[in-house]
Image (cartoon, grey):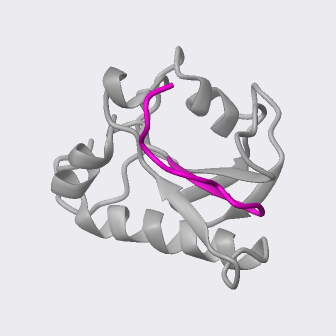
Amino acid sequence: MTASGESGAPATTSDPDCVFCSILAGKIPSAAVRESERIYAFRDIAPQAAVHVLVIPRTHEYANAGEIASGDPELAAELLREAAAVAKGEGLAEGGYRIVLNTGHHAGQTVYHVHAHVLGGEPLGRFGAPE
């Protein structure tokens, strides 16, 4: 359910303490890669790969992948479509890329505004091994 109380209606929630909401509001600069009415993609300021783009919904309504999947499956699908479009636009489709959605502290989530990481541009190595 959205902030307006209607399932599937565009939500416009924001949190003034959220770094991603501040980016969306223009208070923090970002390098835009792709955007749509409900999604914004921008370069990570601390990249973990040659290409590292964050893809976020324009609403703060969902903290993680589970919440967006159950709360607005259409927006979850759009987030993934846009992440794939970012990968294609960045030239990653042929060599391969990774889309990561961290959920919770143990997974490494530090910003509780659902977001996908699009990583690629070089061999990424094994995934999921603790440091």
Q: Is residue 120 magenta?
A: yes
Picture layout, residue 96 above or below residue 113:
below
Picture layout, residue 52 above or below residue 14:
below
Single out the residue that lies furthest toward the bottom. Answer: 94
Asked whether the viewer can see residue 85, the reply is yes
| Residue occupying the point 66% across, 81% down | 93
| Residue range highlighted in magenta | 116-131
Picture coordinates of residue 126 (x, y %)?
52, 51
Picture layout, residue 36 above or below residue 124:
below
| Residue occupying the point 46% across, 31% down | 14
Determine the image quadrant of residue 74: bottom left
Single out the residue that lies furthest toward the top. Answer: 17
Q: Which residue is more in the foreground, 81 or 131?
A: 131
Q: Which residue is more in the foreground, 8 or 95?
A: 95
Asked whether the viewer can see residue 57, the reply is no
Picture layout, residue 25 above or below residue 76:
above
Q: Is residue 15 magenta?
A: no
Picture coordinates of residue 22 (x, y %)?
64, 27
Picture coordinates of residue 6 (x, y %)?
17, 56
| Residue occupying the point 22% across, 44% down | 67
Q: Is residue 2 left or right of residue 40?
A: left
Picture coordinates of residue 38 (x, y %)?
50, 60
Q: Is residue 30 left or right of residue 35?
A: right
